[in-house]
Image (spheres, rainbow, N blue to C red):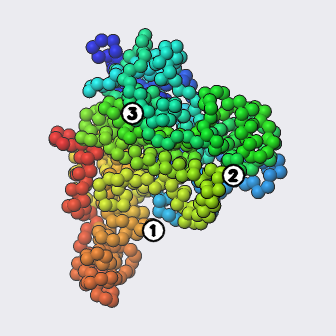
Amino acid sequence: MNMETTGGTTPRTDVVIAGAGPVGLMLACELALRGVRTVVLERLTEVDETIKAGGINTPTAEAFYRRGLLPALAAVQREAFGRFHSFVRQRQAAGASSVRPAPRFAGHFAGIMLRAELLDTSDPDFHHAGPADEVGFVAQQALERLLAERAAGLGVEVRRGVELTGFEADADGVTVHICEAGEAREGGKAGEIGKSGEVGETGEVGETREVEETREVEETGEVEEAAEAGGAGGEELRAGWLVGCDGGRSTVRRLAGFPFPGTDPEITGRQALVEMTGADKLGMGWNETDNGIYSHGPVPGRILTVEFDGPPADRSAPVTPEEVQASLRKVSGTDVTVTKVNTATRFTDNTRQVPEYRRGRVLLAGDAAHVHPPFGGQGLNLGIGDAMNLGWKLAATVHGHAPDGLLDTYTAERHPVGAWVLDWTRAQIAVMRPTPHSRALRKVVTELTGTVTGTTYFAKKISGVWQRYDLPGDHPLTGRSVPDLVFADGTRLGAQLEDGRGLLFVLTEDPGLAGRAAGYADGYEGRLRVVTARCPDRPELAGLLVRPDGVVAWAAGTEASPGGEAAGEGAARTCTGGTATAVRTAGAATAARTADTATATRTAGTATATTCTATATTCTATAATCTAPASACTADELAALEDALRRWFGAPDGMAV
């Protein structure tokens, strides 16, 4: 068991998580990895098989890679590719022309498919994820099963078939009221608040979010101020913290009184896996018509329709074959017949976000904190990013070594990313409307996506490789997902993060770097590990401090060009032998080892590389005259490292913050 008792009979644990979807399970695993006792509450007794998200983006794949789960995802992807190829073969057998798998999926914007052959793969943002870059076609149910298995292995208690019906929060923790699923529905108000309703997904390749529509009160942005609802005759759990990962209709969000402002829905979307006749009349992929947009594929029987005549009248009613058929016929203009619905959902473009992700001892993550339409494949990935960001910060807080304000950086870092996703999806609704103005705009966007620059821009946004937190420091890697460096011994950086601790990489012979980590890296319970390595492909890097979520908190060394060569101020640290080049950049000379022979180029004034003066012509600076050692970090860099260590990991053991 995960719990102990305090005083009376109320069990005590560190964290209670409401919701055992991908976000709740990912967060539970992150907490358990750092020794935090966690209980997860889930209304459903098993994984929901309703059609849901069908893919993940680069940051999500990186998160699983950095926890040792990438091989399992790769196996799931191979099975998914098999189903896709089966769909292609069916279309070919039916006589459809020009049916072939794309060489690489590049994504879509508002149903405008990106052409993979136009993607500029030399863009440096596409060259940092390592093996994680090869995995993306993974369904949400597979993620849930994988995370459930991992959670069990880490000792997380996942209690299925129970519902959170209310809670009281105080300065020391939260008392959570729960009961068996279904009992709350018989108890009036508590049951109404806890009712989950219907879940909608797009589930296409790249469409990677869970869509849970909110109630009318949430669609108007109203807040129901309530600290407790029902729970009579149920069970109580006492915890230090409560995290709502319970979807768009979050009970935790409502009871905690989080505002939920945003924009109201104007569409009705339906997604289903069906059996039908006349499917050969449907176009593959995304198709725009006078009555909306529909999508067909990428697996047999999978269809999606979008109508722009308002939200559904009754979101809780079962989705029938007749409803799906009517919508598909209306939007596609064909007489396709739906004979059976295997799984189906509705969704809208209700788009909202809480202003703060934390209220005292209560936090939100995933759809509980933000809801939006599924187009562009951002939602599930956004939630996994929330879990990765929150997990290590909450763990540090539970263990008592978090610096002041660490937990508040969760909102500061994740809210801007969520706000961007909301606007990204709103923009797609504007481009999808079947109106003259929107269709004119759609033509402009289509022309942009038909260029290398346009395709690369949209693909970077969809894949998530653009994301960067606003952290202190001027190095271009600071605030970014750490690149998956390959070290001289053949190991990779991503594999070093599996234990969920921070990492200080010492990439030069500088004893001062490792010394700064004293007091942080003692034993398994240490907050970070020091890894001394050499990285031949990135010789300009002297050191990296990497947070447990894989974000670079500090970096020393020169900026690298896309080709990996050092450039700019400070490049002299790579001069270790052979013959070097001195280049004057901004009032000071720098030396970089580039090849057997090189020259120093004067760009302004006089450049000096120790004993070598570069005039308007050129001169050769040999290694013998280069006195800037490869092992030296500047005093400013070391001071910045100390600041980053305290900012993210607190004071060293035995010292006050």
Farthest-out residue, top:
233
Q: Residue 175 in the image: state x and y as whole percent.
A: 34, 21
Along the viewing direction, whichever of 369 and 527 lies nearer the viewer? 369
Q: Would you identify the image quadrant in which residue 584 lies?
A: bottom left
Q: Would you identify the image quadrant in which residue 327 lies?
A: top right
Farthest-out residue, bottom:
617
For image coordinates 31% across by 86% down, the residue present is: 619
Q: Would you identify the image quadrant in which residue 477 lies?
A: bottom left
Q: Residue 258 carries which label?
A: 3
Looking at the rendered image, the quarter that the C terminus falls into is top left
Label 2 belongs to which residue? 288
Label 2, label 3: how far apart the Cα atoms are: 38 Å
Discs 2, 1 touching: Cβ within 8 Å: no
Looking at the picture, which amino acid does disc 1 mark?
Gly
Label 1 belongs to which residue? 563
Q: Residue 441 in the image: state x and y as whole percent.
A: 60, 59
